Amino acid sequence: MIKNYCKMCSTLTSLDIEKLERVAETVSILSSILNMDVFLDCPTKDKDRAVVVYHARPEKNSLYSKRIDGEIAHSSKEPAVFRTFITGLPSKNYKAITQEEQQVFQNIIPVFNSIQETIGVIIVEYRESQEHEFNSDMFNFTATKLIKDIDFSRSRIPEFVKDGIVVFNQDGVVTYINKTAEKIYASLGFEKSIIGEEFQNIILTKTTIVEILKRKQEEPIDISISNMILTISYFVTSLEEDNYNIVMLIRDITKEKNNEQEILVKSMVIKEIHHRVKNNLQTIASLLRIQKRRVENEETKKILDETINRILSIAVTHEVLSENGMDSLSIKTILQLLYKNFFKNTIDKMKKIEFNMVGDDFIISSDKATSVALVINELIQNAVHYAFSGRTEGKIDIIIEKKTFFSKITVSDNGVGMNVEKYRENSLGLMIVERLVTDKLGGSFEIKSKLNEGTTVEFEIKNK
């Protein structure tokens, strides 16, 4: 198939096409390693048009809905491709428009024939967010060789990845090692270059050439050696008998593994802290309950009840955080726990109050979660205590809406309603709610009420 597309490029000789067929193997390997779309393009007689002779499309994270082998690349949309055709120089981090009209970034390197003519280019495409996956000095290195037929001394394919690369010929002798691999082996005590060394003398895993050839590609293996954690994998670059190379890829994941361990330890510490905070808050609530039983004044008892509920609403947040060890949590999880743990226990058993919660779910930080819990607690407690005065039944609805910049929570009841202005003047709970919404949640607060029709409160939460 590659040969057929290459024939569309009338500037290529039969030897050039053979060279490009071999280079296509490198393109496939790069795509597998990088998990990105990698292309092999060739020029045509029309200086503003090129042909995609090979598209290596990753199984996941492809920027394309399908392979685009055989399609045309235009200079107006991929200027860096044609820059490299003309100059024979690599092009790094150039913007381009794909055949599917998507904006991408391209890293491009030339492919030369035996007389150093540019007969094609290798293109790696990626989103701007993926740029960090390349080494910043990627184009300063001389080339890597992943297949036997590319000349080490002349190849200009750069090291696209951070992995160490070691190439063995069919005799199991090292014929190439890149600088990353050199550093790894130097840290393992190899003072001299390992080029010329035999497979069994420098291999880092318990495998053999026979096993690698049998499976054609080895699954990555993590090993610990000399205070390092390395991921080792192998590829066979050609399946022709007595004409193959074995490529060993070495990735130093020591830092990543250490970070994972550090995160795990921190997560455990955070969970323990939240667990203790929750227990302490519940202890304080218990002490206040004891104090309440010793008080005869009804107004004082009411104040203590409100304080206990506020403390317990904060404790709910810490309960969730003590279980997941994260610094963020689901808004619905918080509201469901608030209802399960004590909303239903504070309702007058003689009244039939129906609770409904509908809408979106979204993640908020622990700090905001605590504020939301306090706000919802105040609104629900006010509805339970005042909205259904003189009634035996009622309904409280909580509606959650996730929007682009601000999310909104609405708490409404079908109760008796109230005079909002009078309520604002005398309610400590409402003052707490407004202060939390504006100062902690970065949103706005609105309350509406009609006599005998109910009350609706809306407040916003500023998204990250």
Image (cartoon, rainbow, N blue to C red):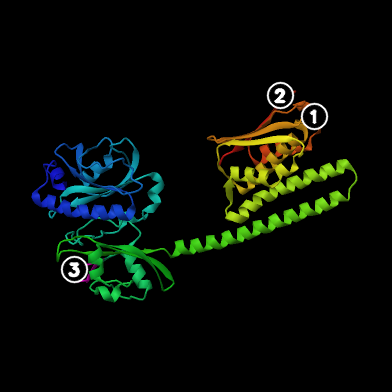
Q: According to the image, label 1 marks what residue?
A: 390
Q: Amino acid at mark 1?
A: Gly
Q: Nearer the viewer, mark 1 or mark 3?
A: 1
- Is residue 181 toward the left or the right of residue 175 in the image? right
Q: Residue furthest right?
A: 296
Callout 1 secondary element: loop
Q: CA distance from mark 1 to mark 2?
A: 14 Å
Q: Earlier in the sequence, mark 1 or mark 2?
A: 1
Q: Is residue 288 above or below residue 166?
A: above
Q: Which residues are magenta?
A: 167-175
Q: Given the image, on which type of amino acid does mark 2 rest?
A: Glu
Q: Is residue 282 left or right of residue 201?
A: right
Mark closer to the observer (1, 2): 1
Instruction: Name the residue that disc number 2 marks.
Output: 453
Q: Secondary structure at mark 3?
A: loop
Q: Where is residue 359 shown, x and y percent of the image?
A: 57, 35
Cα separation, mark 1 vs mark 3, equals 91 Å
Report whether residue 444 is seen. no
Image point 71% across, 24% down: which residue? 453
> Which residue is labeled 3 in the image?
170
Asked if the magenta segment contains residue 170, the reply would be yes
| Residue 10 pos. (x, y %) | 11, 41
Which is more N-terminal, label 3 or label 1?
3
Q: How many marks?
A: 3
State the residue at coordinates (16%, 47%): 2
Inter-mark Cα distance, 2 to 3: 85 Å
